Amino acid sequence: MIKSMTAFSQVSNIYGPFTADVTIRSYNSRHLDISLSCPEFCQVFEEDIKKIISKTHGRGRIEIKLFIREDAKDLELFEVDEAKIASYYQALKKIKENLNLQTDISMADVLSDRNVIVPAKRQWDLENLWKAIEPSIKTASTSLELMRKDEGENLYSDLSARIDYIEGNLKRIEKDAATIPQIYKKRLMERISFLTSDAEEMDPVRISQEAAILADKSDVSEEIVRLYSHIKLFREILESDDSQGRKLNFLIQEFNREFNTIGSKAGNASLSHMVVDLKSELEKIREQVQNIE
């Protein structure tokens, strides 16, 4: 069954003091392109996260946003930068001496430099942190896959209806195309009659030969046979267990090539209009196929 490349999922998971919130969005892309946005201390897990995603998804631009919340009592730990505070105090003393100030240097003066007391460097519990992150990534990836399959079912219904429409109209083209050789023969005879109105009658054998050549050039039976073959293959790909967006996209090009050839050989306005209509329908299919993995 085909799968769409556009989908969204959001999951939250708690393990110990950690809460991992994951949001995944996927878009159209020729290849699998995984982008991860996460806190700096979670970047150590980047390759593991990408491996989880790549096991489920084979194609598309996949954007992952990971947020971590921690419910712990020691979150607001600070430490003193002793070297900086000593240097800052000496600087204040020098200013006092140079300016001959009589006031004492207070604690408030020393602490006026916000950089002397800074948040303490955290030692993250990576093992438990990963136990919060891993299930959330796996669940979000699975949820994204289910949504891509649901969207794929909608695409399947739409594409099936459109290919049925093309097949139905191709039968009309096949019927109309049978009259093309006669149309060209009639035009040839009218042209010859006009050009030889004051001359001797032309050899009927030569006229038949020219008519046969024109009929052969205007014959679209081969193109129609190939189009029926393309339609059959298109349906087989839609029914395939694997997502085959690239194959469908290539097949659309083959469809277009055959329609262009039929259009160039069309002998009447009715046939030309049908070809234009089918090319328009084919363009709608092409746009939908761009969403298939």
Image (tube, helix red, strand yellow):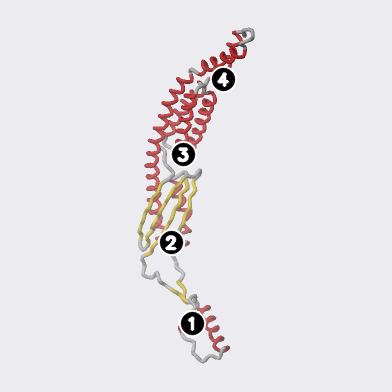
- Identify the residue at horizontal 48%, vertical 20% (top origin): 177
In the rendered image, the vertical position of residue 281 relative to residue 208, given as above or below: below
Amino acid at dot 3 = Glu
Residue that numbered label 4 is attached to: 217
Residues at marks 2 and 4, CA–CA distance in whole angstroms: 73 Å
Q: Residues within 10 Å of mark 1 (few under 14, many from 20)?
A: some
Which of the labelled discs sits on residue 287, or is there none? 3
Residue that numbered label 1 is attached to: 110
Residues at marks 1 and 2, CA–CA distance in whole angstroms: 37 Å
Question: For this rendering, which residue is in front, 168 or 55?
Answer: 168
Q: Secondary structure under badge 3? A: helix
User: Tag 2 or tag 1, which sits nearer the N-term?
Assistant: 1
Which dot, 2 or 4, sits closer to the camera? 4
Q: Secondary structure under badge 1? A: helix
User: Tag 2 or tag 3, which sits nearer the N-term?
Assistant: 2
- Identify the residue at horizontal 62%, vertical 11% (top origin): 196
Amino acid at dot 2 = Leu
Residue that numbered label 2 is attached to: 126
